[in-house]
Amino acid sequence: QNYQKDFLHFQEIFLTSSSNYTISSYLRELTQHPHIAGTQSSLETVEYVHKHFKDLNFETHTVNFEALLSYPVHSSLSLHFSNGTSKELSLTELGQLGKVVVPFHAYSPSGKTMAKMVFVNYGRIEDYNKLIDLGVNVSGCVVITRRGEVLSRAGIVERAAENGAVALLMYTEGGDGKTTRFNDGVERGTVMKGLGDPLSPGWGGIEGGEKLGVKDNQVMKRFPKIPSMPISVENAEMILEGLEGPKVPDEWKVTLKSKVGRVGPGPTLVNFTHQEEKKEATIHNVFAVIKGWEEPDRYVLLGNHRDAWTYGAVDPNSGTAALLDIARRYALLMRYGWVPRRTIILCSWDAEEFGMVGSTEWVEQNLVNLGSKAVTYLNVDCAVQGPGFFARATPQLDNLIIDVTKKIKDPDSEDMEVYQTWFARNSGIDIQRLGGVDSDYASFLQHAGVPSIDLYYGKDFPVYHTAFDSFDWMTTYGDPLFRRHVTVSGIWGLLALHLADDLILPFDYSAYATKLQDYAKTLENLLGSDLDLRPITSAIQEFTIAAKEVVSEAKELREQITSDDLLIMKRRSLNDKLMLAERGFLDPEGLQGREWFKHLVYGPPEDDESKLVIFPGIADAISRATRMPKEQEGKSAIQHEIWKVARAFRRAATALKGELF
Amino acid sequence: QNYQKDFLHFQEIFLTSSSNYTISSYLRELTQHPHIAGTQSSLETVEYVHKHFKDLNFETHTVNFEALLSYPVHSSLSLHFSNGTSKELSLTELGQLGKVVVPFHAYSPSGKTMAKMVFVNYGRIEDYNKLIDLGVNVSGCVVITRRGEVLSRAGIVERAAENGAVALLMYTEGGDGKTTRFNDGVERGTVMKGLGDPLSPGWGGIEGGEKLGVKDNQVMKRFPKIPSMPISVENAEMILEGLEGPKVPDEWKVTLKSKVGRVGPGPTLVNFTHQEEKKEATIHNVFAVIKGWEEPDRYVLLGNHRDAWTYGAVDPNSGTAALLDIARRYALLMRYGWVPRRTIILCSWDAEEFGMVGSTEWVEQNLVNLGSKAVTYLNVDCAVQGPGFFARATPQLDNLIIDVTKKIKDPDSEDMEVYQTWFARNSGIDIQRLGGVDSDYASFLQHAGVPSIDLYYGKDFPVYHTAFDSFDWMTTYGDPLFRRHVTVSGIWGLLALHLADDLILPFDYSAYATKLQDYAKTLENLLGSDLDLRPITSAIQEFTIAAKEVVSEAKELREQITSDDLLIMKRRSLNDKLMLAERGFLDPEGLQGREWFKHLVYGPPEDDESKLVIFPGIADAISRATRMPKEQEGKSAIQHEIWKVARAFRRAATALKGELF
Ligand SMILES: [Ca+2]
Ligand SMILES: [Ca+2]
Ligand SMILES: [Zn+2]
Ligand SMILES: [Zn+2]
Ligand SMILES: [Zn+2]
Ligand SMILES: [Zn+2]
């Protein structure tokens, strides 16, 4: 009882200790210089974060890995018109004086070519098919594409290479096709497939550890086969205006704002040069640890990456500033006598931009301990991009998120809680899922099976991965008063307090069961009656029953707040079940051909264009089936993956029940 | 303090409650009829064991699986001499009236052939090479081989098939080549590769679950390509006497007791017929559960198989009788007020003889719970084969076994403890390891990473897998007074009491570290300076340090026997580390090409003739390297496996440390 009262008291202190002043000062410091991973310039932020944790008297660690990163050495683009004139395109962003890295695609191979250009819209399969209909062959050409919402950069480049293109230029309009880009910013980004250091797939890339050769097949298959480069909207328009050939299809124009009319090829030629350097670099993850008093061997992890393509005021250091402020507030709580029941770990990742490298290496390195002891991973990347709260999570955490947003003030509406405006905007609660690989939660959830959350405010900010993602932009547009920052750090920090301190873990697996039922319907609609989905539906039934039982067991134990020996052990045992149930969704042997991905519910399908965005194993089997000569063979392969998912549901149910019989 | 005293008191009751009378009566009941798995006749033993547990008031369960088993339908052998006469060989064992199953090789394909015969000694590669030297080609012939100690039945048949043989006859002399077989007993056995139901590789073969088709490649590759049959020594001698051709090499004669002089082929022809039936059968595992009072979610498992090729008095029901007597003695303890701290589970497996099917299906089905909660698996198969104590274990359990044998009376020497005679016989303590796949510990250790023990008295008993493995043989030769049975059940039951009741798990990882150091030396001697073993030696160092720290942490906590909230949790946390460290040796993705095998230290090499019998991944890479055209390629592959083992050691060290930093 005492303890419960204390806990409410500490929550109160946490909530009243927010400060937009401190957060903004952290962000200003972090964004003084560009700090791309693996370079000298990034060390300042390592030291800044480390010192911050240290000064607050936290147990602090810097854990290094060696990883193969990629940097641009020299790039150029010039247009050669049919009238014999030519024009060199500027690749740097206006107003920048060489401090930020030139816009590039990390891991794009070096290459040099002089060729005609073709506009391929978003670079999807349907786009290439349309071009074939128009009689346009991209083989031997440089393709120019815009980045849409479906394909990853790597996916765009891969399709271009498959269609015979020799190089690729990519530009980004407003994320929704309506907003404009900010100035002439150019979107940097990685084109590597998979996660983590390419030289140490599946294991921690520690110094002195095993490293594959750069020419190893396993390594090479993660890099694109053709070179690519991001360009500005201005450059893109100039190029597109010079194209002749068939007219741009009407359906492409709907969202295309340039005044361009034809797809090419040519007649203008482009002289494309890109020279990259791959380099084994040292990367630095920084940690603060608050050891739990009762269960030091249970971990609640808060993570955010620190490395940025440029100044990183939004991406990722709005999150870093929030993390540092949570550290400050937790330190305050500790001065009032608080120690968390479970261990809290604040994680500052490096080299996320290159492919979640810092977090992935650390997860790989610590898989055994994380697999058996990590309670939840709470990720925040671009904490503040604009207005509006967004959350993604594994479903057993949905209700906790909802509860917590009811306790935090909305930064943009007087006298409202986040919950209310969030609900109003979506006409309900809309929590997305974590099947993507766009931030550091991916290794925790998809490789290690740790229940995860990802939070952010605003989306599709126009300076994404450009030189204009700066403190200036944040104070002018993103969050002038840093009230959204305060909100995110409040939600993030309070979530972690519950996860670390609640007697019984605030996990609701009935919500998970409901989601699985939805997914089964999605699958049924997609596959029709061709395949037998009963293994899945009956496994979901089992999971649902187990979830219900655990909910009532939890209710019972929550009410017994005194402690005797047996009760302590009963709580631990229940909490272990709650923690480990998510691991049941893992298949230790991984997805066929992409064994690193272990989670059978959440993970990216091999094909970005897959209609199915859950159950990556089933999604892959569906894609492969379309390439199989015998229909029956494809069906059996899909059915086999359906069985695997059903068994994963049963494993999770068994883990939840926690009983052998 | 009270608790410790109580515990010693209960130990005392356990030790004084032994009874050879009860054990012998259990064995008599179990061995009244043959009880091969999957048949009606086996149901009596299911009921007998179930009723025994039930009558003792234990929570009792029967868990069924569906598995593809194999039975003989019709077999015949006749010799056709060059003089035109012929002779039908009797395939049944004399003195048996058709009650026991005819001697056969389970999963041998059906086949029919008339061909010349060649004697191939043990059927090793070197034996076939010798025959080539002698100018003898076995292609198209039926080979006759004796069973040695190196090759498994499946390995013998595989080599014969690779050399072009069309069928195989196998006989067994005394295990050491010196003792004789008992009467005309013939050794039955399985020739399937791998463990568990072939139709559900890697998952529990429950009714209504996924089953592969019998013609699936994954299934077919587990069965031999040519038919085979076991024969008696008498029949073997008759066949061998009729062979002409080159003389039997001198080195083969050393251990060959038959008066046979030539290897063949022919001139005698053999008419070989074998017709098998593969059948999906229901198999029954029976369990008794004693729920722990403090840690019901930690399992100590005692297991023994129940199915037998014939009467099974040694194999396996001497172990079953011991298990049933432990149940009786535990029930007695409970009447005196004992409840174990952790849950104890008595397991009676079915279909072990077909390839560890019952235990494997159950382990596969319950992998998530066993992986996170099983403390130790204690196996006893052929409990009593003759005189002399034998133990195999994962090394953290060595010291516990030694301690326990000091408390149990030797059955064959007045006033001695087992420890003394055991020590004297080996001039030291000789605990073997569990890299084989000859009993039900294999799935627990090699698939799930559960620390394991296997115990038995005597070895190489002459009625192994014959019709003469009967209660009669046991009372006449094996253990007339059942004193050895009492000894095994005493050691087995007391080991389990310690594992279930000790405040701190009695695991000593320093002993494991010492073993790993030995293994590193073995590897160094085998591989020379060609490969870099430093990853392994430095990982062992890390493991050794972690083990030492845990030993002193355990010492400290053992001394604090009072209980407060924090101490309870500290113990649980330490015990979790001790339990989970063994899991670190698993590679979740498994051995290349044999993904079911996850343990990188203990497991069977793919090649039975491998010189290396630890580190199956490295052993396999060495075998594959000999078949690679480029030497360097082979070396890199071995080096990669060395790295994997080193990482497994580090994982185990990390799990033991239990710290992320
Ligand atoms: Ca790695
Ligand atoms: Ca199976
Ligand atoms: Zn980011
Ligand atoms: Zn980014
Ligand atoms: Zn046996
Ligand atoms: Zn046997």
Image (spheres, coloured by chain):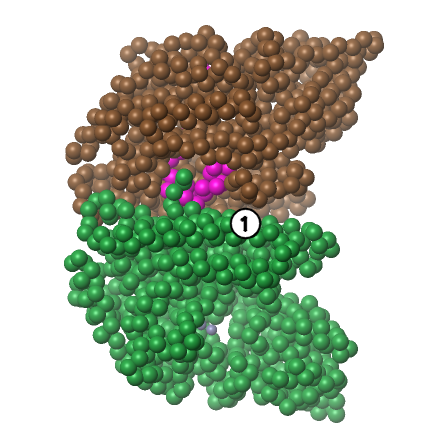
Chain colours: A green, B brown
Residue in the image at 62% along x and 18% along y: B103
Whether B381 is among the magenta residues is: yes
Instruction: State the residue in front, A538 or B500.
Output: A538
Range shown magenta: B360-386
Q: Is A592 left, or right, of B473 in this rendering? A: right
**Would you say B548 lies left or right of B524 here?**
left
Note whether ligand 2 is within 8 Å of mark 1.
no
Query: Compared to A578, does A497 lie above or below?
Result: below
Where is residue B106, by image quadrant? top right
Q: Amino acid at mark 1?
A: Pro
Q: Please provide percent x and percent y for residue B509.
A: 35, 38
Q: Position of residue A72 (x, y in %)?
A: 55, 74
- Which is nearer the eye, A157 or A135? A135
Task: Estimate the x, y position of residue B253 in percent, counting from the top left.
Answer: 64, 14
Write the residue at 71% across / 92% down: A85
In this rendering, position of residue A576 left or right of residue B63: left
State the count of labels: 1
* Image-quadrant location for residue B355: top right
Q: Residue at x 50, y 89 (%)?
A: A183
Q: Can see residue A384?
A: no
Q: Quadrant of the C terminus of chain B?
A: bottom left
State the residue lying farthest toward the right.
B84
For the point 66% across and 46% down, the residue is: B630
Q: Residue A409: x and y, percent?
A: 29, 77
Residue placed under numbered mark 1 in the picture = A535
Which quarter of the picture shows residue A248? Answer: bottom right
Q: Chain of mark 1?
A: A
In what quadrant of the picture does the N terminus of chain B appear? top left
Which residue is nearer to you in this view: B470 or A521? Answer: A521
Q: Is residue A238 magenta?
A: no
